[in-house]
Image (cartoon, rainbow, N blue to C red):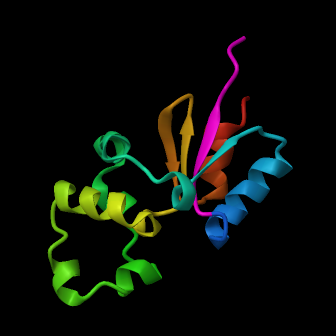
C-alpha cells in the first residue's frame, strides 16, 4: 500500500495552522510542515494551487497583512498574476494552512469536516 504524504504549508504562530496541526496530531496523521517564513513559496507552486482553487481563495483578505497594505496596493490586486506576485513576496498573505496530499493541493484553511473527509481513510 502506498504511503500517503501530507504537507502542511503555513506559519507556526498562526492560530488556524495550530488548530490544523493539533487536529492532525489527534488523528495520529504524520505530516511535514513547510514554514513560509523560513522556506518561502515559489510562484510555480502558487500558480499550481491557483489553477485548482483560484487565486481569490488563496489570497487572505481578512488578515492583518492585507489590512496593512495601502488602498492603492490592494486595488492593484485584481488578477492571478498580481495576486501571485504579492503572495510570493509576502507569504503571510496566503490563506492558511494549505494542505497537500501526495503533492496535490487538497485543503485551504481549517474545516474539521473537510479534513475528516479528505484525510481519514474509510
Residue 39 visible in this rendered orientation of the protein:
yes
Q: Nearer the viewer, residue 38 or 81?
A: 38
* Above or below: residue 63 compared with residue 89: below
* Above or below: residue 20 compared with residue 44: below
Magenta run includes residue 6: yes
Span highlighted in magenta in the image: 1-11
Q: Residue at x 64, y 37 (%)?
A: 6
Residue 109 in which image quadrant: bottom right
Q: How many marks?
A: 0
Magenta run includes residue 4: yes
Q: Nearer the viewer, residue 64 or 27?
A: 64
Quarter of the picture containing the C terminus is top right
Q: Residue at x 48, y 33 (%)?
A: 104
- The percent coordinates of residue 120 (x first, y second) are 72, 37
Q: Residue at x 34, y 63 (%)?
A: 89
Residue 97 visible in this rendered orientation of the protein:
no
Q: Residue at x 59, y 63 (%)?
A: 11
Quarter of the picture containing the N terminus is top right
- The percent coordinates of residue 103 (x first, y second) are 51, 31
Amino acid at each position: 500500500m502506498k504511503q500517503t504524504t501530507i504537507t502542511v504549508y503555513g506559519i507556526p504562530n498562526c492560530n488556524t495552522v495550530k488548530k490544523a496541526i493539533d487536529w492532525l496530531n489527534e488523528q495520529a496523521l504524520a505530516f511535514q510542515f513547510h514554514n513560509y517564513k523560513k522556506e518561502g513559496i515559489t510562484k510555480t507552486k502558487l500558480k499550481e494551487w491557483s489553477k485548482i482553487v483560484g487565486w481569490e481563495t488563496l489570497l487572505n483578505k481578512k488578515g492583518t497583512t492585507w489590512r496593512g497594505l495601502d488602498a492603492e496596493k490592494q486595488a492593484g490586486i485584481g488578477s492571478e498574476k498580481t495576486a501571485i506576485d504579492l503572495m510570493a513576496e509576502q507569504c503571510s498573505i496566503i490563506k492558511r494552512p494549505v494542505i497537500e496530499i501526495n503533492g496535490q493541493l487538497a485543503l485551504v484553511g481549517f474545516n474539521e469536516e473537510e479534513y475528516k473527509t479528505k484525510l481519514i481513510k474509510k
